Image (cartoon, coloured by chain):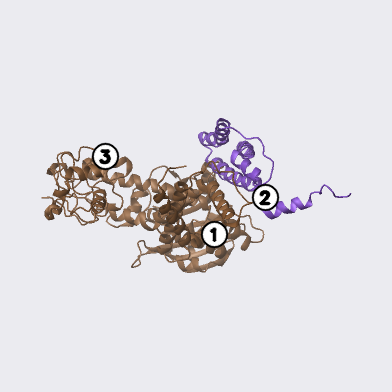
Amino acid sequence: MIALLGSIAVTAALLALLALHDPKRVRTVARAGGQRGPTFGKPTRVAFGTASIAPGVLLALYGAWPAFLLWFGTSCAVGWLLTVILAPPPRRERARRVERLPTPHAGT
Amino acid sequence: MMEVSQQNAKTMLAIHGWSGILLGALLYLVIVTGVVAVFAEEINDWASPLQHSAPHEWPVGLDAKLRELASTVKPEYQEELTMFARAGGRLRVFFHHHIPVEGEAFPQEYGAKFDLHPETLEVLDRKEGWGDDIDEVDAPNALADFLVHLHISLHLPDPYGFFLTGVLGLAMLVAAVTGFVIHRHLLRELFTLRKYRKGLLIRRDTHVIAATWNLPFAFVLAFTGSYFSFTSSVGFPALAMVAFSGDQVAMSETLNGSVAPENTAPATPADFDRILADATTRAGAPNFIIVDHYARADARVTIFTAAQEGALYGRSLVYDGSSGAADTGKTVSRHAAVDRQQAIVADGAAALRRLRRPFLQRRLVRARICERVRDAVRNVVVDHAARGDPRMATHGARSHLPRLRIAACARADHMGLFHRPRPGTCCTGAADGGRILHCNHRGRHRDGAPARYGSIAAMVVGRPGHRIAGCAGAAVDRRRAGLGRGVVGRSASRAVDGHGVRDRRRVLHLDGIAQSRRPAARDGE
């Protein structure tokens, strides 16, 4: 169980890093009006991607197939959740946020 | 991701869309009920709880109770006894015998069913009749049964429900494959969801993101779903047709080991409590038990156990039902063999009713049975070859054994369903100078006759120096190239040199258009 949770945690952390520094996602955020953050280069992305799969490969090599399946399913769900959570917000919400910001002349 | 031409991409997009549109709603139903049905056991326990129950444990004192119950049922019902836990931990005990029914592949069960309280062993319910009829009015398990059957067969009659869910699985597989191919930036857009764009684009991104992250599981679900559906409804009956002349009972006996000699002499049953304790010590808690010929000298107890922690499979143990000794041999009684195979393989609905838990393990048991089918068919082929059956294509059969690609077996009239000889191998009798002795033209081929062009399902390839019998690929190319009768019957010593037929163009080239237009070409003479 600990091995399973550990492997999921490692994969989730690496996927989060990949998502945060994914060039296309960062570009999309910038286009949507957000801040353009740093991105990973291709070698880094490949390394992180490989490392994120490694826990599952280890589980499979170890023969822990139920744990492997759980890791597999959870990793896919985490990846999808990260994508949804880190996506730039829709227009209306963005407009609302802009409205909430204080104008330069406010309070004068 | 993958380079495809624009036209191909359009075609695949259309296939992707239509496979989703036409079968999407049903597929959605199957998937949603499948998710819920994983918890079928818990749902049953919740829906029909028992007071003061210790669910899913085998109580001490079961032996005495079985003897008492056996004395209350008709002697013929003691032919077989099955036991397993149902909703709320109730113990289902079913004394029954088997009656052949016209139109059914297997004899049907008829007998007396008892539901016992798992702690007090009090009889909670008693019914007598056909096994399927009893299951249909099984109120405590009704909710989970409803969900499970909706998932596996959409409540359609057997085997049509399995056909439909199998087709749904294939449609999902097609959608997954075409989606994978047509989406060019699968990895690049793995984290890209443009919520700030307009409606259609947002929906497109949402669809792609959800599908991409679920693609591996979509493959697994679609493949296993169609595999299990078609295994029950098509694969096993077809294998029985191929290797056992349609006798599914004979096939199941082969799969489950040799049949023990019958001994109808009465005998005192072994202490069942002791057997259960021994099985629990050896392999964990039992979850399904079959007793054959209860209170007879040839009684035999087969116990299936749940998978241990971290394992995918449970185990099955066999005990002598009169002495209680663990049986390490493979001999099983006739009805145990039939019933096990029937329970796990052929009669899917009944099997799922009886092999109630755990759900996942039941499916895995089926997978194990599939391996045994493969071994059994392999043995049949080897047996034919060893006996020097003149109609046996030894060369082809042997060369395909590892892949279960039986080239041509004397009993394989319908082998076309499975048979796909590789190019360069021969599925014809080599001793007959390359003439096709037996091939897989869906049973249309006459023994001893040369190959004939027709609805050739698979490639039938002569060896170097022999004739090309026919080639499905070539037939397709024939239409595409606007040829006449195809390549059948041409002398093809140059073409079949180990790889010729796989290469359709080469076959066409070597056989030539002019020759293949010959009307007489179909006879190969």
* SS assignment at label 1: helix
Chain coloured purple in the rendered structure: A
Q: Earlier in the sequence, mark 1 or mark 3?
A: 1
Residue at mark 1: chain: B
Residue type at numbered disc 3 = Ser
Residue type at numbered disc 1 = Thr
Q: Chain B, which colour?
A: brown
Where does the image place residue B291, in percent across and percent down from the top left?
A: 45, 54
Mark number, residue A89: 2
Query: Nearest the camera: A12 or B251?
Result: A12
Where does the image place residue B242, in percent across and percent down from the top left?
A: 28, 53
Mark number, residue B12: none
Residue named by callout 3? B399
Please say if B25 is above or below B206.
Answer: below
Residue named by callout 1? B33
Q: Neighbour class for label 3 at 10 Å: few (<14), some, many (≥20)?
A: some
* Relative side of B251 to A14, left or right: left
Residue at mark 2: chain: A
Could one spot residue B227 in this view of the protein? Answer: no
Count up the numbered dots.
Answer: 3
Q: Neighbour class for label 2 at 10 Å: few (<14), some, many (≥20)?
A: many
Query: Nearest the camera: B296 or A68?
Result: A68
Query: Nearest the camera: A95 or A108?
Result: A108
Where does the image place residue B389, in percent across and percent down from the top left?
A: 18, 46
Q: Neighbour class for label 1 at 10 Å: few (<14), some, many (≥20)?
A: some
Could one spot residue B137 in this view of the protein? Answer: yes
State how far apart marks 1 and 2 are (Cα). Answer: 33 Å
Residue type at numbered disc 2 = Pro
Q: Are marks 1 and 3 in contact (CB under 8 Å)?
A: no
Residue at mark 3: chain: B
